[in-house]
Structures are given as structure tokens and as C-alpha cells.
């Protein structure tokens, strides 16, 4: 009897999940089930990879991505061992520093951004102070007058890894997503938000939370514009006109100033988080590049390099953009959600993990790549954080 009750409960859970996303079915049911099964296998595999200190790979950002993949699962994550999630969260909290950063020994900006989002996902009131101070720390990382940058600097408005002077679009997109998420969290939590003076030292930041520097988003938009190949918007002489994005102004990981896949999705997503209208030429041009270069087989212009980061960013960007179909240059209409589910299910290893044969940018790390894929599938299937 207990076995039948469990089976019925599981079916009801999947049925209730299938009609999420504003009651619109955008992924065919059999493909959805394949995606859910892939998520389940990935979560099971990740359990075996947790370290004695509660982390995955002894690294805050990787741990945070894994924990969020559990928190966003279409299944009740406690069936995959709630203590594992709690231990992962404890590890992240123990990495929090007095200045608001959350990291161990490198890349404080990147780690803080990813960990901040996971702590918000957890929905625990006890994390409120850490969340507020992490937000404050990220805001202070932005390159502006406080760090000696003027608006005509190509780096003005950007955010880097932390501890260096060179921002880039990848770090900025993580930070903007975290800051947007923290704004929404602040509104829900109803804690007081106020502005601070740009010159206030980081160690003296208020602890009750804030809305950010007065024109934080405007500064970020300026940096985004200088990363986009779009004449008439980007005032840099090197700028082309295909609408795609590069890694930082004047430099592309694809060589020269060539637009490429992962950064173009990052740019699109960042403009949307910065409240740029969907009809704006900057967003329309970015989407046109995506439409013309649509694929789930490679990271356009980079091939296998950063492929799983690409999948993760693609899913988030297209989900927030709000279009379920993309028509390519050949006139073929793609359901990007179904395409991505099928692709990720096809390349998942039997044990449940994913890994990139091209290990650049840490994609040899199976825990990181598996978290990227699970989170991408959860975006595709429009999973929601459970109350």
C-alpha cells in the first residue's frame, strides 16, 4: 500500500509540474519527462560527489550552483537527502567574510554573485544579513568614480572577478543577475533599502540593506553597450554592427572583436535585467544575432569551448526574453526548449553527470558542468523555487 501511495504521489507531482509556467505547455510531454529524468539522474550523481566539508569541489561557487540545482528541482529535493543541501548551505555561509564577500582564496566577485543567488533561493530568514552585505559588496565592485574611472573609460560600469582592475561581461552578467534577484528578494522581505554615498568605505557599509548606488544600472548599461558590436550605440571605433557581444570592450575570446555565443546571451540577459525594453534596438539586435547563429551543438564561434556555460546562459537568457520559438536564417522554426532538452539528454553520461571534453574554463569539472546542465534544464522546464 505504501509503495502505491508513493507512486501516486510521484505522478501527481509530475502532473502538477507539467502545467506550470502560466499553464502553457511549450515542451511536449515525452520530452519533458526525459528532461525530468535527466535532472533526477544528475542530482543522484551529485550526492556521491559531496565532500566531507559539505562542499562540491571545495569551491563556493560550484557548491552554490549545485545547491541551487537541488532547490530548483521539479522534485521535492528532500527525497535526494535534505542534509546534503543543508551541509552545502552551511559551507557557503562559512565562506562569508566581514566585508560581505563570500569566497575562499580567489575570485571574490564571481563567487559572491553565485553564492548570493543560492542563499536567496534557500529562502531562509537567517541568511538575510549575509544576503544584504553580499549585495553591498557587489555594488562596491563596480568600476566608477570611486575607483578612479570616468564615464569615458571603456571599463566604466563593469564588474570583474574582484581584486583586479579589469571588468568583463561574464562577471558583470553574474553580478547583475544576483543584484536583480536581491532587489526582488528585498521587496518580498520588506526590509529597509536606502542609498549610500559612493565614497563610503566598504567596512562601514550599513547592515540593514540598500537599493544600490543611484545610477548603478545606468553605469552597467554603458559597459554593456561597449561590449556590443552595434554601431550607433557602441562609441568605440572597433565596433561592428552584427548585434553580438564580446568578452570586454575591444577583446573577444573568439579572437579580435568577434561576437560569440555565450557572451551574446549574457549581454541579452543583462540588458533585460537592467530593464531595457524588449523593443529597444540593443535587445533586438542581440536577438537577431542569436537568431542568425542559433544552435545547440556548439558555442557559436568557440565550438566546444565553454559549451556548458553557453547552455546555462542560453537557457536563462531565452527564458527571461520570453520567446519559445526561434526562426533561423533558413526559415526553420525551433522550439529552443525542446532542442536543449533533447541535446542535454543525449550527451548525459550513463552515471548521471555531464563533462566537456574541452576542459577550458573549468569544464573538466564534472560537478560544475553537471550543475550547469541541471540548472539549464530547470530553466527550460520553467521550474520554480518552492515556498
Image (tube, rainbow, N blue to C red):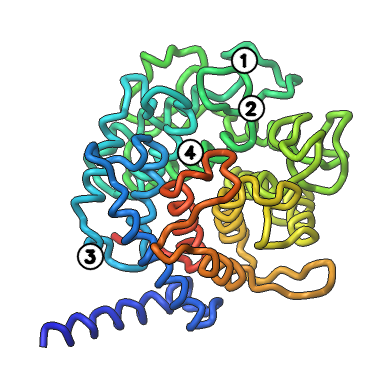
The residue lying at 61 percent from left, 51 percent from top is 307
Residue 297: percent from left, percent from top: 67, 61
Q: Which mark is residue 179?
A: 4
Q: CA distance from mark 3 to mark 2?
A: 43 Å
Q: CA distance from mark 2 to mark 1?
A: 10 Å
Residue contact between numbered discs 3 and 2, judged by CB atoms under 8 Å: no
Q: Earlier in the sequence, mark 2 or mark 1?
A: 1
Residue 271 visible? The answer is no
Label 3 belongs to which residue?
Answer: 79
Label 1 belongs to which residue?
Answer: 145
Residue neighbourhood size for the residue with mark 3, other residues' Cα within 10 Å, grouped as few (<14), some (14–19), many (≥20)? few
Residue neighbourhood size for the residue with mark 4, other residues' Cα within 10 Å, grouped as few (<14), some (14–19), many (≥20)? many
**What element does badge 3 sit on?**
helix
The residue lying at 84 percent from left, 31 percent from top is 235
Q: Earlier in the sequence, mark 1 or mark 4?
A: 1
The residue lying at 44 percent from left, 42 percent from top is 183
Residue 135: percent from left, percent from top: 42, 32
- Disc number lying in front (3 or 2): 3
Q: Earlier in the sequence, mark 3 or mark 2?
A: 3
Amino acid at each position: 500500500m505504501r509503495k502505491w501511495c508513493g507512486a501516486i504521489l510521484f505522478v501527481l507531482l509530475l502532473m502538477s509540474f507539467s502545467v506550470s509556467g502560466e499553464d502553457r505547455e511549450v515542451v511536449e510531454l515525452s520530452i519533458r519527462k526525459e528532461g525530468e529524468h535527466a535532472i533526477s539522474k544528475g542530482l543522484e550523481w551529485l550526492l556521491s560527489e559531496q565532500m566531507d566539508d559539505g562542499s562540491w569541489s571545495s569551491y563556493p561557487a560550484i557548491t552554490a550552483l549545485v545547491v541551487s540545482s537541488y532547490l530548483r528541482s521539479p522534485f521535492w529535493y528532500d527525497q535526494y537527502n535534505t542534509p546534503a543541501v543543508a551541509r552545502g548551505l552551511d559551507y557557503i555561509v562559512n565562506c562569508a567574510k566581514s566585508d560581505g564577500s563570500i569566497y575562499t582564496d580567489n575570485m571574490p566577485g564571481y563567487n559572491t554573485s553565485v553564492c548570493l543567488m543560492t542563499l536567496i533561493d534557500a529562502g531562509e530568514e537567517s541568511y538575510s544579513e549575509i544576503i544584504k552585505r553580499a549585495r553591498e559588496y557587489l555594488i562596491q565592485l563596480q568600476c566608477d568614480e570611486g575607483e578612479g574611472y570616468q564615464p569615458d573609460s571603456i571599463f566604466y560600469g563593469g564588474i570583474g572577478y574582484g581584486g583586479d582592475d579589469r571588468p568583463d561581461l561574464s562577471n558583470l552578467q553574474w553580478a547583475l543577475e544576483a543584484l536583480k534577484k536581491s532587489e526582488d528578494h528585498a521587496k518580498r522581505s520588506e526590509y529597509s533599502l536606502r542609498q549610500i554615498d559612493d565614497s563610503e568605505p566598504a567596512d562601514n557599509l550599513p547592515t540593514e540593506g540598500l537599493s544600490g548606488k543611484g545610477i548603478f544600472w545606468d553605469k552597467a548599461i554603458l559597459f554593456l553597450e561597449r561590449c556590443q558590436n552595434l554601431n550607433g550605440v557602441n562609441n568605440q571605433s572597433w565596433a561592428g554592427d552584427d548585434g553580438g557581444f564580446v568578452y570586454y570592450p575591444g577583446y573577444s575570446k573568439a579572437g579580435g572583436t568577434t561576437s560569440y555565443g555565450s557572451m551574446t546571451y549574457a549581454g541579452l540577459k543583462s540588458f533585460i535585467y537592467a530593464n531595457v525594453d524588449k523593443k529597444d534596438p540593443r535587445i533586438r539586435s542581440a536577438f537577431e544575432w542569436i537568431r542568425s547563429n542559433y544552435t545547440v551543438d556548439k558555442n557559436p564561434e568557440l565550438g566546444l569551448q565553454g559549451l556548458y556555460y553557453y547552455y546555462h546562459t542560453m537557457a536563462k537568457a531565452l527564458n527571461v526574453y520570453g520567446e519559445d520559438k526561434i526562426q533561423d536564417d533558413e526559415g526553420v522554426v525551433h522550439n529552443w526548449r525542446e532542442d536543449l532538452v533533447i541535446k542535454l539528454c543525449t550527451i548525459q553520461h550513463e552515471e548521471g553527470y555531464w563533462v566537456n571534453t574541452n576542459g577550458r574554463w573549468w569544464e573538466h569539472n564534472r560537478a560544475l558542468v553537471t550543475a550547469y546542465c541541471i540548472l539549464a534544464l530547470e530553466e527550460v522546464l520553467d521550474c520554480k523555487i518552492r515556498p
